[in-house]
Structure formats: structure tokens, C-alpha cells
Amino acid sequence: EPEVTQTPSHQVTQMGQEVILRCVPISNHLYFYWYRQILGQKVEFLVSFYNNEISEKSEIFDDQFSVERPDGSNFTLKIRSTKLEDSAMYFCASSRDRGNHEQYFGPGTRLTVT
Amino acid sequence: AQKITQTQPGMFVQEKEAVTLDCTYDTSDPSYGLFWYKQPSSGEMIFLIYQGSYDQQNATEGRYSLNFQKARKSANLVISASQLGDSAMYFCAMREANTGNQFYFGTGTSLTVIP
């Protein structure tokens, strides 16, 4: 069964450094998403991406964040200058279309900013 | 106002018993979808079940069923015949047709199945 994959599974970085989190969505899906989950808290929407552009973003997704689909398979989240409060689990998800269909989540990348 | 409310931070259930996890939602959009996800200790999010706002019947997927009460704006998850492997966090989520693609998640319920 096809699945969303994410790399790395765990990333440790120093405050102020740039990180890139990578995701490979399910191949025939058209909509891609990033969510984050701070430890012990609920999952929060960051951004959705369709047709090579951002379709929606939340207040969390400020100028330090960017997303890109550099080729036909990868979908990346870049955090330019990490802060301690960026420490969280970051989930990538994809869905077939925009309707009320489930989003398939990847296993997550745990980002630790020290 | 919170879009999704899960009032049970933790629940315990005896193995083989049924358990209901509560979820209420808030929306003025007539078209929406309700989802339940399971998050085991390993961290991944596993889709369990979906209910559309126009669906006449409650959704069922194996041992999972969704008790959809539209007038009360509740979408409780019922797990029948609990198994030890059901121990996990459970998140209720909603997607509104008018606000696009994002999911709104609740704070989750931690379920522990006791042998």
C-alpha cells in the first residue's frame, strides 16, 4: 500500500540554523500539507500546497517557513532560522483531491532545537 | 471558539470491552467532514474513519464506528472489542468545505486498554 514517507525521522539543530524537512507524498496525490505537533499538544495546520503554490497557510506559517516541491516527488518544509519553540513533530500529509477525503500522514520528523 | 473539542484527556477500558471517545465540533459550514486518527506511541498518524456531514448513516470501519449526532454536533468514536493494540492517542478532526484543505484537530484522548 502506498504511503507518505518523511526524512529524517529525527533532526537536532542549533537555534538560528536552517533546517529542511523532506517528504515524499503518495504518487497520485495532488494536495500536500505540513502540520506540526508540539509535544503533548494537538496537531496544528501549517500550510497546504497545490499546483506548485501555497493554497492556504495558518498564522504559524510566518516568514521563517517556506515550502517547495523541487521535483516530481519531494515536498519540503524549510525553517530558515530555527527557534527553541520550533521544537515539535512535523507531519507531512497528502490527499487525492480537495474534497472531503482523508489525508494520509507520514510518520513525522521530530525536530529538536537546542 | 474551538473547532474541535475532546473533553476526555485520558480513558481506560478493559480488554474486549467497548469504549466511546467523545468529540464535539463547531462549524457554520453545511458541508464538512469529520475524521478520527489514531496516534500510537511511535508517533505516526493513522486514519481510522470518516463521516461526511450529508451522510445519512453512521460510518463504520471494522471495529470502529462513528456515532454522528448532527443536531448535537457530536461525532463520537466507538471502538468495540478493545484490544491491547488500541492503546494510543486518538484525535478527532474536521475539514470544512468553505475553509479549504486544512484539518482542525482536537487535543486528543489517550486510551489505555487494560488486560
Image: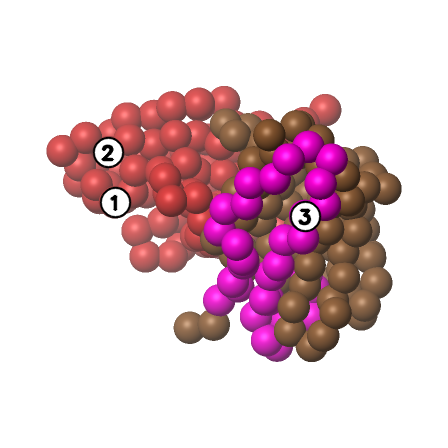
Q: Say the numbered circle drawn on residue B113.
A: 2
Q: Are marks 1 and 2 on the same chain?
A: yes
Q: Name the side, left or right, on which B21 lies relative to A90.
A: left
Kindly identify the amino acid type of the residue bearing the numbered disc 3: Val
Kindly identify the amino acid type of the residue bearing the numbered disc 2: Val
Q: Are marks 3 and 1 on the same chain?
A: no
> Subunit of mark 1?
B
Where disc 1 sits, the SS reads helix
Chain letter tied to red: B
Query: Does the rendering let one see residue B97?
Result: no
Which of the two discs, 1 and 2, labels the residue nearer the N terminus? 1
- For chain A, what colour was chosen? brown
Q: Which residues are magenta?
A: A3-32
Where disc 2 sits, the SS reads strand
The residue to which callout 3 is attached is: A19
Q: Which dot, 2 or 3, sits closer to the camera?
A: 3
